[in-house]
Image (tube, grey):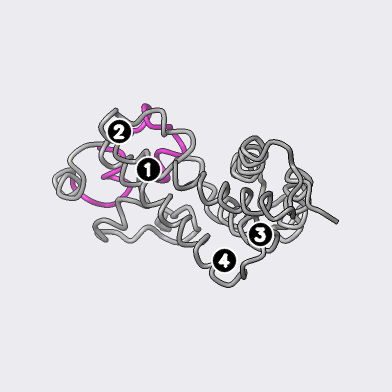
Amino acid sequence: MSTAIDRSPEGGPIPRGGGREAIAAAAREVFEQRGYHGASIRDIAKRAGLSLSALYYWHPSKQDLLAALIEENTLDYFRRCDEALASAGEDPADRLRALVKATVEYRVQRQTESNISSREWRNLEPSHEERLAGLRTKASTIWSDIVDAGVEQGIFRCEHPADARRSAQAACNAIAQWFDPSGPVTMEELVDHYTRIVMRIVDLRP
């Protein structure tokens, strides 16, 4: 008789009894499948192979667990961006290309995490929303610093840099909502397409 094995969003088995990691993997699955309000802390504990008391040891409430996931997801995205920009040089166009690539790849490779962070932010309680607000500001600043530098140097010719930043960032972030890994478009093609789109948005100088 075969035994079903729960899978993580990355395709691997959820580590039974793995504490924080098991809870995070289970919570990502349950939130993705049922949404924050449809998920119960009992369901998450069961999916993780842990008792409720063990889950509460790590996270005192479902709300704290959601906040921890969003924070972890966002910091992971920042690490990807930092790594990409560290080797991109100082040219704003090269840096923007690197940022687009890092963002597209993250939204494709971490679709579940990206969708939870974007969809469930509205369900954060005010105390958590206030604590994590700086992460949202930093996410925008990463883009605006590059766009503003390109405009100042005459490399980007967009008349409204703030609007250009919002459009470029939103377009790349939205990929997680619709991309189908089994579809005809590869991640490499997606990176190329969105790099071209973003460069048109900022009006890269020929």
Q: Secondary structure at mark 4?
A: helix
Measure the alpha-carbon separation of dots 1 and 3.
Answer: 24 Å
Determine which residue is flagged by label 3: 92
Specify few, some or many for label 4: CA neighbours under 10 Å numbering under 14, 14-19, or 20 or more.
some
Q: Position of residue 147 (x, y in %)?
A: 64, 49
Quadrant where the C terminus is found in the figure = bottom right
Point out the tag, 2 or 1, that comes first from the N-terminus.
Answer: 2
Left or right: 44 with respect to 171?
left
- Amino acid found under the numbered disc labelled 2: Ser
Residue corresponding to mark 2: 40
* SS type, badge 2: loop
Residue 67, image x, y percentages: 32, 41
Marks 2, 1: nearer the viewer: 1
Amino acid type at circle 1 is Gly
- Magenta-highlighted residues: 28-51
Q: Which callout, 2 or 3, points to the residue nearer the camera?
A: 3
Q: Amino acid at mark 3?
A: Pro
- Within 10 Å of disc 1 (Cα), the crowding (few <14, some 14-19, many 20+) is few
Q: Position of residue 161 (x, y in %)?
A: 66, 40
Q: List the residue tagged with mark 1.
A: 134
